Image (spheres, rainbow, N blue to C red):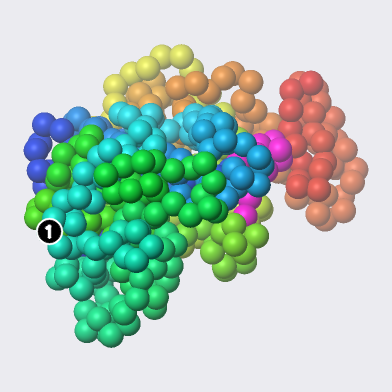
Amino acid sequence: MSLRFYNTLTRKKEDFIPIDSKEIKMYSCGPTVYNYPHIGNYRAYIFADILKRVLLYEGFNVKQIMNITDIDDKTILNSQKEGKTLKEFTEFFTEEFFKDLKSLNLLEPSKFTKATDYIDQMVNIIKKLLEKNLAYKSTDNSIYFDIKKFKNYGKLSHLVLEKQKDNASGRIKTDEYEKDNIQDFALWKAWDKKDGDVFWKTDLGKGRPGWHIECSAMSMTNLGEQIDIHTGGVDNIFPHHENEIAQSEGATGKQFVKYWMHNEWVLVDQKKMSKSYNNFYILKDIKDKGISPISYRFWLLMANYRTRINFVWEALEGSDIALKRLYGLYIDLGNDIGKISKEYQQKFKEYIEDDLDTPRALSLLWDLVKDANLSPADKKATILDFDKVLGLDFENVKKEIIPEEIIKLSEEREEVRKNKDFKKSDELRNKINSLGYEIKDSSEGPKISKI
Ligand SMILES: [Zn+2]
């Protein structure tokens, strides 16, 4: 078995062959810091983290860049609403984002890059595109990419070329738009009064960059003209990544990215979780319910990153209990760390190498903890080995995790309560108390804690 990833560009699983086997170059589209990301957004970062961990597990060095979009239509608009400078406004949400990444146990990228630190590099790419006649200045002094001049436009999102030529008759200045609105997109937006004091004076005139050029500039500056992997959510495929390809390949004449990888949406009531539908939750909502962000990570890993998943609180609470149970079983294994089971490790590799099959990897983890033929010490070593990829933070599991016995008693109590056997339910509660734990019934189910 070797590493195989689904490549959006070719629409199939392909063997992963790095450009340079010494170091994998990977770029992950990061957040636009105009608000708190919702938990659906975090699926993209958790997916990229698992991918990076798999590459590290396979023995590669990985250079991963993640951008922070601190200049675009939305950051300008929201900073003005709050009466703050763009810098102080975006710095606040950047810090909040970093805290969230920590609580989700993400490995830090090699570097976070802020778009506003790369204006010169963006200007240089745009100049190249102007020279090559792939871009033009419009009457309002904004600069647009001429998509009809780039013959591969549409190759990532698999747009039908002829159809797009018919439609592509105008220009679009906003950063986000739908496929049926394909037009020449803005590389550089000439200043207008809505931008207030947000502008740069450059060779291209007074203005600011479009969103898409930001990622091309940050990727090429830090990772070179060609990279192995670029990640993002499926909604980045069009127009963001399609436009990144046009700008980057237009400027260099080389293939920009070898493997494009995208995660699917998190849904709520079968609809995409999004700010525009107002059906979203942020990480704080999870913490406020007493659920660990790692349990959210665990819940996401139960599905393949390329399948849509429907978010419901009951499912997340279920995964919180399941993770606590795993922690409890892990604690029960004692302090000794033995040898990694080669047999389990082999299977684990087989699963994760197959386009990051985390659902099968997790069911293998359950098989492992229940396997009576392995010594506790070897189990412990193997769990810690798996966790290099899963990132469920077993290493830091503390003793106060609820023991398996207490969880079982609490489940038994739930069962008899459902059958209205309150006498038995009270007996079980007393037993749990006598073992040093208490149960509080809440609207979200019973909560167990140490007395
Ligand atoms: Zn991007």
The reply to whether residue 25 is in sight is no
Foreground residue among 137 and 173: 137
Number of residue marks: 1
Please provide percent x and percent y for residue 425. Answer: 84, 42
Please name the residue shown 9% across and 55% down the image.
Answer: 253
Foreground residue among 443 and 330: 443
Residue 181 quadrant = bottom left
Relative to residue 266, is residue 203 depicted above or below? above
The reply to whether residue 136 is in sight is yes
Residue 380 part of the magenta segment: no
Residue lying at the far right of the rendered structure: 423
Quadrant for the C terminus, please. top right
Please name the residue shown 33% across and 29% down the image.
Answer: 111
User: 10 Å neighbourhood of mark 1: few (<14), some, or many (≥20)?
Assistant: few
Residue type (three-letter) at the residue carrying disc 1: Lys
Q: Secondary structure at mark 1?
A: loop
Residue 411 quadrant = top right
Please name the residue shown 43% across and 33% down the image.
Answer: 106
From which residue to which does the magenta span run? 280-290
Describe residue 73's horizontal placement relative to residue 136 as left or right: right
Residue 178 quadrant = bottom left
Please provide percent x and percent y for residue 371. Answer: 41, 37
Please provide percent x and percent y for residue 277. Answer: 62, 64
Residue 286 part of the magenta segment: yes
What residue did someone put label 1 on?
Answer: 132
Describe residue 428's horizontal placement relative to residue 9 as left or right: right
Relative to residue 382, is residue 410 depicted above or below? below
